Amino acid sequence: WIERVGIGLFPPRWRLWRRSAWNRALDAGKITVHSLDPAAHIGPQSYISPTARLADGRSYLDRTTETVIEIIRRDCTTKMLGRR
């Protein structure tokens, strides 16, 4: 829900502001959303909670960390391959 609220709260994300940095990045395909459900944005069930657990036993924090590392590695690999 926080993503939807953010769009309403931050005018640069409104499509009306087509030339905002956010909308230029969105149009260029530089913004992606990665769902970390069932984690919440804040609170004891947040995606950085070391105590909340997934069904497989990993903490929400571990899963978030793994996801971020995977994204960074994929981006670095793509850039390295693109330069060759």
Image (cartoon, rainbow, N blue to C red):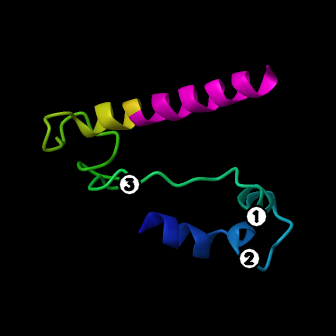
Look at the image and tell me in which quarter the N terminus lies. Answer: bottom left
Cβ atoms at labels 2 and 3 below 8 Å apart: no
Q: Residue 23 has which mark?
A: 1
Q: Secondary structure at mark 1?
A: helix
Quadrant for residue 48, please give it.
Answer: top left
Residue occupying the point 38% across, 30% down: 66
Which amino acid is tagged 1?
Answer: Asn
Cβ atoms at labels 1 and 2 below 8 Å apart: yes
Which residue, as the protein is rendered here, is positioned at the far bottom?
16
Residue pointed to by mark 3: 41
| Image location (x, y in percent) of residue 25 | 75, 55
Of residues 71 and 38, the one nearer the viewer is 71
Residue occupying the point 45% across, 65% down: 2
Q: Residues within 10 Å of mark 1 (few under 14, many from 20)?
A: some
Q: Residues within 10 Å of mark 2 (few under 14, many from 20)?
A: few
Left or right, 74 with respect to 25, comes to left
From the image, give the main secondary structure of the stretch colored magenta.
Answer: helix
Left or right, 82 with respect to 41, comes to right
Q: Earlier in the sequence, mark 2 or mark 3?
A: 2
| Image location (x, y in percent) of residue 22 | 74, 59
Left or right, 7 with respect to 28, comes to left
Residue pointed to by mark 2: 15
Q: Earlier in the sequence, mark 3 or mark 1?
A: 1
Q: Residue 70 has which mark?
A: none
The magenta region covers 67-84
Look at the image and tell me in which quarter the C terminus lies. Answer: top right
